[in-house]
Amino acid sequence: MNFNRRAFLSTTAAVGATLAAPMIVRAQDGARPRVVVVGGGAGGATAARYIARDSEGAIDVTLIEPSRAYYTCFFSNLYLGGFREFDSLGHTYGNLASSYGVNVVHDWATGVDRDAKTVRLAGGGDVPYDRLVLSPGIDFKNGAVPGWSTAVQNRMPHAYKAGSQTQLLRAQIEAMPEGGTFAMVAPPNPYRCPPGPYERVSMVAHYLKENNPTARILIADPKETFSKQALFEDGWLRHYEGMIERVGPDFGGGNVEVDAEAMTLSIDGDVQNVDVCNVIPAMQAGGIVHAAALNEGDWAPVSAYDLSSRLDESVHILGDSAAQGDMPKSGFAANSQAKVAANAIVAAFTDSRQFPARFSNTCWSLIDTDDGIKVGANYEASDEGIVSTGGFVSEVGETDEVRAETYRESIGWYDAITEDMFG
Amino acid sequence: MTGKVIPSCKVAALVAGTLSLTPFSASADAENGERLFRACAACHQIGEGAINRIGPQLNGLVGRLIGTVDGYDYSDTLSEAGADGDVWSEAALSAFLEDPRGYLPGTSMVFRGIRDETDRTDLISYLIQEGGTSEAAAEAGPESGPSPEIAAILAVEGDVAYGEYLSSECTACHRGAGGEDIPSIAGLAPSVFIAGLSAYRTGEREHPVMNMVASRLGDEEIAALAAYFEAQTTE
């Protein structure tokens, strides 16, 4: 690919009057401006790559990410269903370093000194920044599900951050006794990947149908409704009739308690023995957002125009952690937001142009073999936040051909977005 | 992408004036064409009683809307060309036969092409002799060319820097090169790129994601994207 923003500038006409001229902010003493990105997922990796690429080396980009291999949450359900190899979900940061010049630091960011503009590393030392990008994903809220904490996550996995948790959940499903029970405690809104728990149920059902057909799936759900509900329920009826039971809030689905030692799940006081208990607790912004005191409640309020924090304009907060308005917490959304923030950051430090924010999102889900569905929308920035300007969702009763095409499209998207993130 | 993509709407425009129901070259050698057709006959039938085999039957090929023989399961590429109103004019057929995958990337026809222009003319002459032509040729009319909507976009000079910014929405799904399930759009000729996005914007081509994406693209945005992607290589 040919990336040469500057060269284009000299040959193209000035952009329309509606576009603000970028304010040039030079770093002190002629040194290269420093952008530090915390979190190497769909938001952070994309931001690091775009800032480094589009500034052509004019900006010093450091990416702080503890994992050497990143496993995508998106498509991790397909691994549970047997549609993907675990290794196919893994990506490394070598190319961001070698092809784009990003300084990749494998460490935990534990704090931010916003006055001194430095990020504290667990391994010791502070990393200075002129602009900071936080894209740490989600953390679980302690005590959200009585009886559950991260201390028991190896008994009752969340598998909602991909990696060893995902492998553990798969191993537990494989080890289920004949006719056993897979239970899921679904999260309340808002949470990462709205269709995720229900795609997971579909994938577990697919596995069980093939390997343990008398097993059952029990969902305790605090929400009245959920993403793509009609599509999932139609699919469950067609593919997994009688296997899946969902207990909504009217029947106590929001009043649950677990006992990891006894492997029991209590729904509205009714205690049941379960063989696998996948607890997906209520969520909040990643810990570094709270450590930097950039949250209001559980999430970090941001400007819709450039994802800058409403509490500190030198910090941009992307993806799941951001309270930005209408966009769902998805990898696609984080990737979309990262590009808007990257454009604003590069324009602030170089003579390249800033363009109006525009966002989009599409989420694909797989119900069974070649039965894919999707939902998507366009979004724009407003003073109040990011607002949806219209979208689409798959329909019940689509032909097999349409569903198979939707699934193939999701594979194409996976290949493209991971390339967009990691180069 | 080799740069050999010939924008189909331009071909249609070029051809409209000269398209007739008789072979365009009086000196065409249908006997040579018959000899050349042997390679085609492995998959295609022509003449009385011709039916679809590995490839579609070829009666009335010249003048027919691309990818529209009843009962034949075409690649998306050919189906979409037909849906866009592209016709197998003699010139379009000649360009296709020269480099099938270059002209219609995604075609499922396995054929390396015929480089010699005279040979192509002879083969097309044979196809018309044996299979006749279709009414659509006459209907194509001298006005066929870019629609007013597409012409309006073609008239806008694309702002490449803006196109680069906008392209980041495309690259969430379209890879720089390759892409089995979602095609790469790098290096596309502007007329092809613009015709495609325009058809998604009007809804003429149906695809939920692309209809959504295109719905908020103005002429300026489409022209900018076309200018940007034209300059991208797939290396």
Image (cartoon, rainbow, N blue to C red):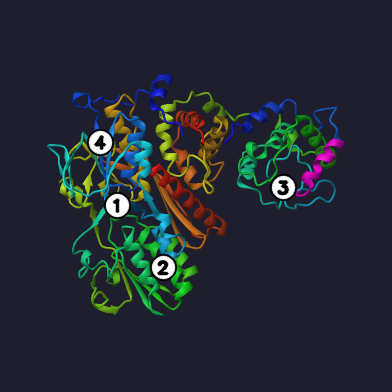
Location of residue B34 by image quarter: top right
- Which label was assigned to residue A204? 2
- Residue beneath disc 3: B69
> Disc 3 and disc 2: Cα gap in Å?
43 Å
Above or below B104: residue A77: below
Q: Give the image location of residue A207, x and y in percent.
A: 45, 69
Above or below A169: residue A294: above
The three-letter amino acid code for the residue at tag 2 is: Val
> Disc 1 and disc 4: Cα gap in Å?
20 Å
Disc 4 secondary structure class: strand
- Residue beneath disc 4: A35
Please report whichever mark, 2 or 4, sits nearer to the chain's N-terminal start: 4
B2 drawn magenta: no
Location of residue A262 by image quarter: bottom left
- Which label was assigned to residue A67? 1
Magenta part of the chain: B31-43
The three-letter amino acid code for the residue at tag 1 is: Ser
* Residue drawn at (53%, 23%) of the image: B155
Chain label for disc 4 = A
